Image (cartoon, rainbow, N blue to C red):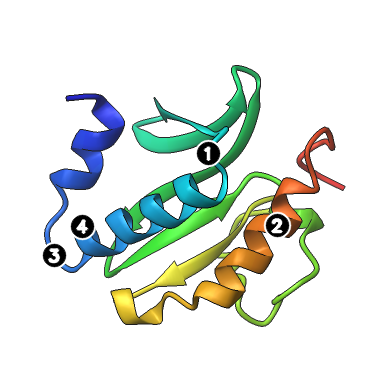
Amino acid sequence: MKPAEAYILNKPEPYRSILLQLQLIIESSLPELQLKYKWHLPFYYFSEKEPFCYLNQSKNYVDLVFWHGTHLTKHTETLVLGGRKHFKSLRYFAVEDIDGEILAEVLEEATSMRGKKYYK
């Protein structure tokens, strides 16, 4: 088993289900992404040097963190900065918290940021 998949499958519920649902949505929306294991986290890349987002289970939630988060302008009321300067995330406490419409729009906007530096 690959380390990124092991990270997801070894998490306790409800985090495993949240991570699996996010993985399914991300990979079906953006099949060109490659799932890697970087910095001990499942990390999606467009290419070897082009990071897109990563998944992180921390405390009592799962964060879907966007590399170009500082550039995102849609759903800013939902995106969490969480003490980070450049990354923003969508935070989920339960599978039911995943709003497919918001997630799709943020994925689309984040995809449009390809090629930009990760900070403003």
Q: Amino acid at mark 1?
A: Pro
Mark 4: secondary structure = helix
What is the quadrant of the N terminus in the image?
Answer: top left
Report how far apart the C-alphas of labels 3 and 2 lie in the structure.
28 Å
Q: Can you give x and y, in whole percent of width and height, for residue 79 in the image?
A: 62, 71
Q: Is residue 75 above or below residue 2?
A: below
Amino acid at circle 3: Glu
Q: Are the two marked residues, 4 and 3, in contact with CB atoms closer than 8 angstroms?
A: yes
Q: Amino acid at mark 4?
A: Arg
Mark 4 or 1: the one toward you: 1
**Tag 1, which secondary structure?**
loop
- Which numbered disc flags the more N-terminal residue, 3 or 2? 3
Which of the two labelled residues, at mark 4 and mark 2, occupies the earlier sequence position? 4
**Residue displayed at 22% across by 62% down:** 17
| Residue shown at 31% from the left, 56% from the top | 19
Mark 1 / mark 3, whichever is N-terminal: 3
CA gap, disc 1 and disc 3? 26 Å
Residue 74: which quarter of the image?
bottom right
